[in-house]
Image: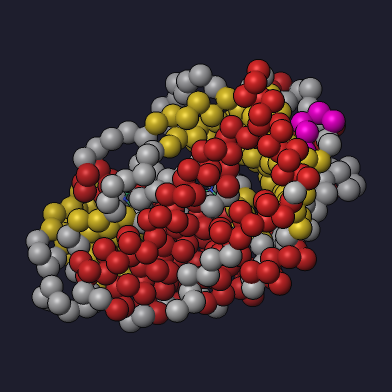
Amino acid sequence: MGKFASAKKVLICGAGIGGLTAAIAMARRGLEVVIVEQAQELRELGAGLQLSPNAMHVMARLGLIADISAVAFEPESSVIRHYRSGRAYLELPLKARCQSRYGAPYYQIHRADLQRILLRAAQEAGVEIALGESATGFTQSDTQVRLETAKTTRVADVLIGADGIRSVIRDGLFGAQSPRFTGQVAWRGVVPTNALPPDLIAPKTTVWVGPQHHFVTYYLKAGAMVNFVAVEERSDWTKTGWNEPGRIDQLQEAFEDWHPEITALLDATSQCYLWALFDRDPLAAWSFGNVALLGDAAHPMLPFMAQGAAMAIEDGWVLAQCLGQYPPQQALLSFEAARKSRTTMLQKISRKNAKLFHRNGGLGDLWQRSKLNIAGLWPQTATQRLDKIYGVNVTRP
Ligand SMILES: Cc1cc2nc3c(=O)[nH]c(=O)nc-3n(C[C@H](O)[C@H](O)[C@H](O)COP(=O)(O)OP(=O)(O)OC[C@H]3O[C@@H](n4cnc5c(N)ncnc54)[C@H](O)[C@@H]3O)c2cc1C
């Protein structure tokens, strides 16, 4: 295949949210797609994911809205509250506003449900998924890429690294560089709603902000479960993994003087996981020749804007359109040009929110508190900021 023909066969490394979305969109454009995934089976740990309207536009174009809405939860609003008194600094409507303002809903979904929906859609679109194959490296010529896995060698016109923050494909493109520990860990868990006192948790996305910690709660599975993410500052991370089973007693201790809503939720928690939060600076480029990165492999971001998966989903759609339109190398460069400023902006906002959500004393703390109070007085300013994120529909020609 020459430089000027369109790609016919695409290899994707990684069957996460980004890799699966890209595969569905590419297969629907007539490309032959193979995903190579290291896991023996696709199984997400118990945790939730927020899907904002910008991500839902892509899901709508892929015909997956009905499947998602059947298992998701649509929150009334998003609210930031004081960790102890519960006072609301800022509340923004979601349910009443997202569909009318952005043309798509705001949903919260269990990761396992989303992955199951995407996996089935990928299989129905004819995508081949090779499980239990760990990529180890690649070589490329002007027209072909050879991906080495622990089992075999695979050949395609284009290789996409959708293999997350510790991407092997990224290392192969730009040299190995470890991600940086941010000094924060996230405890994550889900609790059945019927194990909680009635009406304990409001049908809202709630961010509780306090000293060196913040705590997020929202519903999943049409309200049958409550998901939480509890973020704590730590000086180091000494474990070998970055996602470990957590100890409930330690989690309770970290939040013991918080609002009774939080302590009651933790009392009902029987299992949790601890994720160390790692970060990387924006890359100068995302591709070289016929190989490119997407999602966390290209632009990992802290979870404080809940946009990492949304960006991987948008990437998947845009990349598929570029590959359907241009010869491979031009397609990969067009993809990067279309996406980079947006994902870089979100990497920066997510970092800033880490400061906004944690009280650290002193003048800096006063400044962050006053920013939240001001945002509460002029919520339209916060809405206008969100327009830049939620108001983008990458599927619109
Ligand atoms: C606490 C927390 C909360 C979050 N909440 C939200 C949220 O509410 N909304 C949101 O939009 N985002 C959220 N995110 C971010 C989101 O989870 C990520 O941005 C998203 O999962 C990235 O998707 P991805 O497909 O790029 O990578 P991943 O989901 O990391 O998938 C990568 C895949 O590649 C596979 N892989 C890796 N290496 C290899 C290899 N060598 N060979 C083959 N396969 C390989 C992996 O097994 C995996 O299946 C959150 C993140 C965290 C940590």
Residue 10 seen in the figure: no
238 shown above or below 34: above
Quarter of the picture holding the N terminus: bottom left
Q: Which residue is painted at 81% across and 41% down in the image? A: 88
Where is residue 36? Give x, y as percent.
32, 59
Q: In the rendered structure, does residue 170 fall within the stretch colored magenta?
A: no
From the top left corner, tell me how far across and down residue 256 is, in percent.
76, 23
**Depth check, front residue: 388 or 377:** 377
**Residue found 27% across the figure and 69% down from its top:** 331
Start and end of the magenta stretch?
A: 79-85
Q: Is residue 58 left or right of residue 217?
A: left
Would you say 25 lies left or right of 221 here? left
Residue 334 placed where, x, y %? 30, 66
Q: Determine whether 385 is above or below 31 in the image.
A: above
Query: Which residue lies at the image location 42% right of the left edge and 49% below the top edge?
Result: 344
Instruction: Tell me which corner region of the image, top left, top right, bottom left or bottom right, holds residue 155.
Output: bottom left
How many numbered discs sit on the rendered protein? 0
For the point 27% across and 51% down, which residue is it?
285
Examine the rendered structure and indicate whether residue 54 appears above or below residue 242. below
Which residue of the protein is positioned furthest toward the right in this rendering?
198
Q: Which is nearer the eye, 163 or 395?
A: 395
* Image side of residue 343 versus residue 271, left or right: left
